[in-house]
Structures are given as structure tokens and as C-alpha cells.
Image: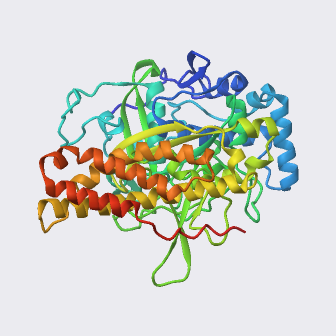
């Protein structure tokens, strides 16, 4: 078992540098306190891992609400908007409020009693640590083979603490489910955990001209009926970290943004606290008496996720499920969800934070972009790829400001997706016909779709500037061009392939009834 935390080991999440930031061409690292004191001079976060940046934005947004008073549930909508406009007009966060908040709470990552975002009880509740390789994404651990990594059971290299804190955020928000290091609570031992609250999701965050604007624009408004004073707390605001019942109330904004982790973590520092040499990683909120089987965590509406309504087969009730991140799916394909206002007939609902963006000052609203952070994962243990993107300013395209533009975007997104489905069907049929095979292989279909989507993006942006151009015909032309390109060699060699592709192209261009427009309120 690793040794207990050394009294000499210290690293303050508030005051030691660990957060990568960018100002113009210059990059630097800051602690959380410096992040807020200098937010008006910082252009953007620059964390190398998008899921860590997405997690940090939620933490920073909760702190923003605290130091500005935007976390007051007694404020009316008008008062809340007025207060946010006042904070924006001030141009920076009040230094006294920043210092008062950070001086009030514990931020040391290696504090023996209240380590930041960790549970010190794991030293005694776990028989052994999980190992630094299990903690660091990409390293082999346990019986996994080391295909492309120099790390192994006997070569567990320490991690700089600044990097370890970012990795810790990834586990808290995007951690896997399934088997974990066993933990004993109240005499009951279990070793399975639930997946993180953001696992396999894609987040949409408002992006201002400075970090100060970004954080204030990203504060979600209180939409509940009531909230008891003092009931809401971020993990570092609690006196004693302890396992939270899975049925605990999701309060705003502290627990909603920072307190839904399904993972308990404890870092083991190296000499002085500059590195992390080991870690405990286990379950956090599952009730100990539950069976040793992972289950889906409580569904709560995260303000930065879009949602899809799913009707249950055996019930007329509806539940919400977040869209899964897909590294192969370009962000513009979600644009219809972002610009259309929610209504009772819609299948998709845009992130709730968008509902307050129209109340921002005009100059900020016109310049506001959207930062996209996605982590392509399966629902349990496999991490495929993380990605990020920045949209152009798009709030002027929303349904509230330009209904015609919003409907054109929705039409083009819909036609792009439907054309892709038709292309896949036509390509499979053409392959089957050309090869005289009973099976409709996906070879041509997969390649054609790979070529189609970049072409479709070019068509999409052109159609937004040409509202009179027929969208189905434009996307059909892109699909036909993609199919011809991927089948060129086959068409030259075999007449049967040429005839099959010609029929497929004809099918793609065939006229069809336009799909019904989305109903609006």
C-alpha cells in the first residue's frame, strides 16, 4: 500500500499553475484564483484534452455564479439578467470577491483531510491502490497489452501534478463503468462503478471574446421551483468529503455542474507534491447495499448538452437522452438543434444555456461563438477519440432573431442526412448488382459516405447564402459525385459496375416529395 500523504507534499489548485490558457499567441499556466483575477485578459482556455476543458468550464462556471451572486435562486429572470449585464459591463471579476471565495475553501490537492475533489477515506476503505497506469488514459494497466506504450506494471512513471489534475477531471466527468478497485463502506465491500455523467457526450459552450465573457455567458439560469438556502454545495465547499447517496437531490448550480461524479479518487503525491506517483480510483455515489452491477446514473439535464426525446414503447411518457459524441460527425450537422427554439413538436432540444444567450448585450451576442467539446466513447469502458471545434458567430441565426435562416439551416441539415441515407442504400444496391452477389456489401457505401460528407459541408454553407437553390438537388449532386469518385476504377474495368453506378446516380437524382418542415410555435 502506498505511503500516506507526506506533510511536505502540497499543490494548490487555486494558486499553483496547472490550467493552460491562451492570450493572443502566448500560452501560460495558472491556478484557479489567477484564472479569475486575469479572466478579462485571457482569450481562452488551452487545455490539451477537450474533455478536461469541458469539465473545467463547468467547475469555473459554478465558481463564477458564486463570486458574482448569479447563484441566488430568489432573483427573478429580469433581476438575474440585469446582474449579469452589470458583471459584463464591469469588464472583470471583482478581485475582492475572487479572493474572498478562494480564501474560504480548501484547494490543496494533497491535503490529508480535505484534498481537492478527492476522498481521503480511500486510504483505509480500499485494500490497495489502482496504480498510476490505470489512472492515466492511454497507459496499459492490469492484463492489458502494451501495444504502443512504453509503460507497464514495472515501469509506472509518475505524472506531473498539473497534468494529473486535468486527468482527474476527465475521470470525474467522463469515467468508465464496470469493475474498479473494491471499496468497503460500513462493512460492505463492492467493486463496480457507474459511468461518469458526461460519458460519450458532446458539449456546447458559449465562447466570448475573453474568458471573462465566456464564463458569464455560460452561467445557466435557475429554472427550478425552489431551492433551500445553503442546500447546494460544490465538493470543495463541503466540510467532509463522503460517499453521496445516488438518490441525492441535484441542486443548482453547484451539484448540477460539479457534484455528479460517479468516481471517487485519491492521488498519491511524489516528493514535494510536484508529481503524482499512484492513485486510488473507485466508485463514489453508488449505495453500498446495491448489487455488484453497474447501472445508469441519475439523468439530469446538463445545460450544455442537447437532448433527444425518446418515446418508450410501453408508455406514452417521454424521457431524455443526450446525443452521443461521434468523432466522425462534423459539428455543422448539429446546427439545426442549436438554432431552433424548443417546441412541443420537436424531437431534439438545444442546450438549455442557449435560452439565456439572447439576453446578452448586443455586441457580445453578435460576436459569441460556440465551443464544441466531444468525447467519442462507448457506454462502458472504451475511449475512442476526443475532439473539439469552434463555430462561427451563430446567435443571429437562431429562430428568435432570424426565423427564415433557422428554418433554412434545419432544411439543409435534414436534407444532408436524408441524402446520406439514400447514398448508402444506392451504393449497397449498386455493389450487389455489379458483383452479382447475394449480399449487399458496405464497401462502396462506406467509402462513398466518407467522400460525401466533406462535399456536403461545402454545399451546406453555399445553400445558406442561396436561399432559392433547391437543397435536395444540391445534396444529391454531391452524393452522386462521391459515388462516381469511389467507383471510378471499377467502372473502368467492368461494364456491369458502370451500369450499376449509373442506375444508382439516377436514383439519387430522382425527384421525391419534400419532407415536411419542422413545426414552430
Q: Is residue 20 toward the left or the right of residue 280 in the image?
A: right
In which quadrant will I find the N terminus?
A: top left
* Viewer-nearest residue: 324 or 186: 324
Q: Is residue 343 toward the left or the right of residue 114 in the image?
A: right
x, y (%) of residue 33? 66, 26
Q: How many marks?
A: 0
In which quadrant will I find the C terminus?
A: bottom right
Q: Is residue 47 visible?
A: yes
Colour scheme of the rendered structure: rainbow
* Residue occupying the far top of the picture: 26
Q: Is residue 67 toward the left or the right of residue 298 in the image?
A: right
x, y (%) of residue 8? 48, 20
x, y (%) of residue 475? 46, 53
* Viewer-nearest residue: 445 or 277: 445
x, y (%) of residue 199? 44, 51
Q: Is residue 236 visible?
A: no
Residue appearing at x 70%, y 22% in the figure: 38
Indicate the quadrant where residue 177 lies: bottom left
Q: Is residue 472 above or below residue 386?
A: below
Q: Is residue 76 toward the left or the right of residue 421 in the image?
A: right
* Viewer-nearest residue: 92 or 479: 479
Indicate the quadrant where residue 324 lies: bottom left
Q: Is residue 304 above or below residue 249?
A: above
Residue appearing at x 83%, y 55% in the figure: 77
Residue appearing at x 45%, y 20% in the figure: 274
Indicate the quadrant where residue 129 lies: top left
Amino acid at each position: 500500500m502506498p505511503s500516506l500523504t507526506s506533510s511536505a507534499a502540497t499543490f494548490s489548485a487555486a494558486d499553483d499553475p496547472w490550467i493552460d490558457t491562451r492570450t493572443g499567441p502566448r500560452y501560460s499556466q495558472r491556478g484557479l484564483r489567477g484564472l479569475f483575477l486575469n479572466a478579462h485578459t485571457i482569450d481562452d482556455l488551452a487545455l490539451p484534452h477537450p474533455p478536461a476543458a469541458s469539465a473545467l468550464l463547468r467547475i469555473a462556471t459554478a465558481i463564477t455564479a458564486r463570486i458574482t451572486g448569479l447563484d441566488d435562486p430568489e432573483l427573478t429572470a429580469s433581476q438575474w439578467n440585469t446582474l449579469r449585464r452589470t458583471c459584463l459591463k464591469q469588464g472583470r471579476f471583482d478581485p475582492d470577491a475572487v479572493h474572498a471565495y478562494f480564501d474560504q475553501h480548501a484547494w490543496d490537492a494533497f491535503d490529508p483531510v480535505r484534498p481537492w475533489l478527492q476522498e481521503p477515506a480511500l486510504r483505509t476503505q480500499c485494500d490497495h491502490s489502482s496504480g498510476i497506469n490505470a489512472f492515466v488514459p492511454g497507459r496499459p494497466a492490469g492484463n492489458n497489452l502494451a501495444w504502443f506504450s512504453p509503460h507497464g506494471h514495472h515501469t509506472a512513471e509518475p505524472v506531473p501534478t498539473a497534468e494529473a489534475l486535468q486527468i482527474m477531471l476527465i475521470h470525474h466527468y467522463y469515467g468508465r463503468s464496470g469493475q474498479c478497485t473494491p471499496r468497503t463502506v460500513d462493512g460492505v465491500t463492492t467493486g463496480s462503478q457507474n459511468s461518469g455523467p458526461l460519458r460519450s457526450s458532446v458539449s456546447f459552450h458559449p465562447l466570448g471574446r475573453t474568458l471573462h465573457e465566456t464564463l458569464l455567458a455560460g452561467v445557466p439560469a435557475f429554472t427550478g421551483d425552489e431551492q433551500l438556502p445553503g442546500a447546494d454545495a460544490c465538493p470543495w465547499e463541503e466540510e467532509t468529503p463522503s460517499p453521496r447517496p445516488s438518490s441525492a437531490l441535484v441542486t443548482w448550480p453547484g451539484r448540477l455542474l460539479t457534484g455528479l461524479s460517479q468516481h471517487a479518487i485519491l492521488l498519491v503525491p511524489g516528493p514535494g507534491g510536484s508529481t503524482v506517483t499512484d492513485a486510488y480510483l473507485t466508485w463514489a455515489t453508488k449505495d453500498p447495499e446495491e448489487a455488484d452491477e453497474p447501472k445508469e446514473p441519475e439523468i439530469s439535464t446538463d445545460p450544455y448538452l442537447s437532448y433527444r426525446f425518446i418515446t418508450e414503447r410501453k408508455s406514452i411518457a417521454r424521457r431524455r437522452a443526450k446525443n452521443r459524441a461521434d468523432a466522425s460527425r462534423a459539428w455543422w450537422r448539429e446546427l439545426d438543434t442549436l438554432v431552433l427554439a424548443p417546441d412541443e413538436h420537436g424531437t431534439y432540444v438545444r442546450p438549455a444555456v442557449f435560452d439565456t444567450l439572447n439576453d446578452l448585450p448586443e455586441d457580445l451576442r453578435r460576436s459569441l461563438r460556440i465551443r464544441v467539446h466531444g468525447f467519442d466513447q462507448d457506454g462502458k469502458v472504451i475511449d475512442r477519440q476526443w475532439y473539439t471545434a469552434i463555430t462561427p458567430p451563430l446567435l443571429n441565426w437562431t429562430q428568435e432573431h432570424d426565423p427564415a435562416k433557422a428554418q433554412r439551416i434545419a432544411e439543409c441539415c435534414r436534407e444532408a442526412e436524408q441524402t446520406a441515407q439514400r447514398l448508402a442504400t444506392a451504393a449497397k444496391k449498386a455493389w450487389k448488382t455489379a458483383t452479382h452477389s447475394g449480399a449487399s456489401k458496405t464497401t462502396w457505401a462506406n467509402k462513398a459516405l466518407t467522400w460525401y460528407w466533406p462535399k456536403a459541408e461545402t454545399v451546406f454553407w453555399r445553400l445558406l447564402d442561396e436561399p432559392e437553390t433547391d437543397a435536395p438537388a444540391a445534396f444529391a449532386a454531391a452524393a452522386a459525385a462521391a459515388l462516381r469518385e469511389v467507383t471510378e476504377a471499377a467502372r473502368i474495368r467492368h461494364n456491369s459496375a458502370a451500369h450499376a453506378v449509373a442506375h444508382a446516380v439516377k436514383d439519387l437524382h430522382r425527384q421525391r416529395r419534400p419532407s415536411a418542415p419542422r413545426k414552430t410555435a
